[in-house]
């Protein structure tokens, strides 16, 4: 028989396995998680350093700030006052420290001067008063009062002497950005001592007393108002100057916007830039007059708006918030003049001829001139 050959059987091939797709998303997630951990760690480390610096005053600036603690202040109010004064960065951290150190029981009402370089423990120690009860007086500062009038009223109520308060107004270096660059002198704080009702201790630290008014001004000048000032084309001091003119001239609240429009119209005029506002002359006279004379309008003072164009060097009183808002939002008018009538309100005019008719129609005010 012929030899049978074995027919080779084809090798069975194992099915090829498909390669698993590379899990790029998994790698990316791992990288992002790693970066998150690094970032979170860095953030927490940074926050830890800032908190430690706040508690221990490791790198704080060396400055002094007045702090007034009243009978009604709890530890939260005290922490907020320290924060507003720039002494502590994190009020919640000071409250936490106070809770575990019983600081609230150690702090007494009083007027204090604390330093930026004090740590929390030193701050608590600095706010311990050795005196017992101190009499408190309530003092109301009306809108339109000058610095002179405010200091006299404070001294009359026993807050401190006129001389001590004046020295603070003229020379003390308060830590407020709106006071930066203002020259020393009696009129330096004119416009910034906010009219309101305040509580003071009898014989209070004069720095603390004046700072109460400045701190209130700082609070009342909200970010919205500051933004409007930035958009107005005027500086804060110029807006306060316009507001002070409105405060002194307006007979009622309805007149503020119109008087503001007259001031703005004249400032933007080519031919009528003399504001001719009587209150600016009254500001420099030794005593206020019922009616100015022609000689008064010739006084050589930079505040004399009959003689010098534009705004006076600074505010002539301390205006309230209504006048500040009116300075920023004048009525849309064509008025360039206004005159007081016998009814005690102002009549507004577009032309000199109209203005003169108002004067002639009110001889009881202007003596028939």
Image: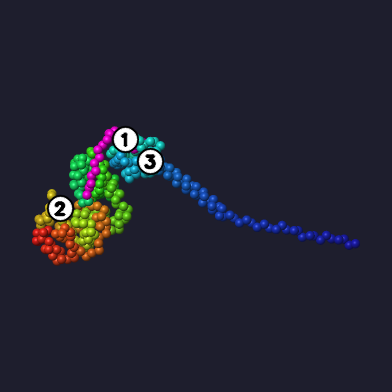
Q: Quadrant of the N terminus?
A: bottom right
CA separation in Å, label 2 and label 3: 49 Å
Residue at position x 15%, y 59% in the image:
343
Mark 1 sits on what residue?
128
Mark 2–mark 3 CB contact (< 8 Å): no
Was residue 125 drawn as part of the magenta stretch in this picture?
Answer: yes
Q: Quadrant of the C terminus?
A: bottom left
Residue 160 placement (x, y as % from top left): 21, 40
Was residue 205 drawn as part of the magenta stretch in this picture?
Answer: no
Q: Hey, which quadrant is residue 78 in on the image?
A: top left
Give whichever of 15, 307 is nearer the camera: 307
Q: Please give the label number shown on residue 94.
A: 3
Q: Is residue 55 left or right of residue 314?
A: right
Q: Secondary structure beneath disc 1?
A: loop
Vertical placement of residue 271 versus 243, above or below: below
Q: Hey, which quadrant is residue 252 in on the image?
A: bottom left
Label 2 packing within 10 angstroms: few (<14), some (14-19), many (20+)? many
Give whichever of 354, 88 is nearer the camera: 354
- Mark sitting earlier along the chain (2/1): 1
Q: Hey, which quadrant is residue 44 in on the image?
A: top left
Mark 2 sits on what residue?
282
Residue at position x 52%, y 50% in the image:
33
Q: Is residue 249 left or right of residue 60?
A: left
Label 3 packing within 10 angstroms: few (<14), some (14-19), many (20+)? many
Residue at position x 43%, y 42% in the image:
48
Q: Is residue 222 visible?
A: yes
- Mark sitting earlier along the chain (1/3): 3
Residue at position x 89%, y 62% in the image:
2
Vertical placement of residue 116 versus 257, above or below: above
Residue 290 placement (x, y as % from top left): 12, 54
Q: How many marks?
A: 3
CA separation in Å, label 2 and label 1: 46 Å
């Amino acid at each position: 028989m012929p030899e049978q050959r074995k027919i080779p059987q084809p090798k069975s091939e194992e099915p090829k396995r498909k390669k698993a797709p590379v899990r790029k998303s998994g790698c990316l997630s791992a990288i992002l998680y790693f970066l998150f951990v690094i970032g979170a760690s860095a953030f927490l480390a940074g926050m830890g350093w800032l908190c430690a610096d706040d508690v221990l005053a490791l790198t704080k600036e060396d400055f002094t700030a007045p702090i007034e603690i009243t009978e009604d202040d709890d530890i939260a109010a005290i922490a907020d006052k320290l924060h507003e004064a720039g002494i502590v960065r994190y009020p919640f951290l000071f409250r936490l420290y106070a809770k575990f150190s019983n600081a609230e029981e150690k702090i007494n009402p009083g007027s204090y001067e604390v330093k930026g370089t004090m740590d929390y423990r030193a701050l608590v120690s600095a706010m311990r008063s050795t005196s017992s009860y101190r009499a408190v007086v309530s003092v109301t500062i009306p809108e339109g009062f000058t610095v002179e009038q405010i200091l006299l009223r404070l001294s009359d109520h026993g807050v401190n002497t006129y001389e001590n308060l004046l020295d603070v107004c003229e020379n003390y270096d308060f830590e407020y950005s709106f006071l930066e660059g203002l020259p020393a002198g009696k009129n330096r704080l004119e416009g910034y001592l906010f009219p309101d009702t305040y509580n003071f201790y009898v014989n209070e630290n004069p720095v603390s007393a004046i700072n109460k008014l400045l701190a209130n001004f700082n609070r009342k000048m909200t970010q919205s108002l500051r933004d409007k000032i930035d958009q107005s084309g005027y500086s804060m001091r110029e807006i306060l100057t316009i507001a002070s003119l409105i405060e002194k001239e307006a007979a009622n609240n309805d007149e503020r916007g119109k008087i503001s429009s007259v001031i703005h119209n004249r400032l933007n005029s080519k031919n009528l830039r003399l504001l001719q506002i009587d209150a600016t002359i009254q500001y420099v006279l030794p005593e206020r007059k019922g009616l100015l004379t022609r000689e008064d309008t010739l006084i050589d003072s930079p505040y004399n708006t009959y003689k010098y164009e534009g705004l006076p060097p600074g505010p002539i009183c301390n205006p309230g918030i209504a006048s500040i808002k009116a300075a920023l939002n004048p009525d849309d008018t064509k008025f360039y003049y206004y005159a007081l009538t016998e009814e005690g309100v102002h009549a507004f005019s577009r032309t000199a001829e109209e203005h003169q008719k108002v004067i002639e129609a009110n001889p009881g005010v202007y003596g028939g001139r």
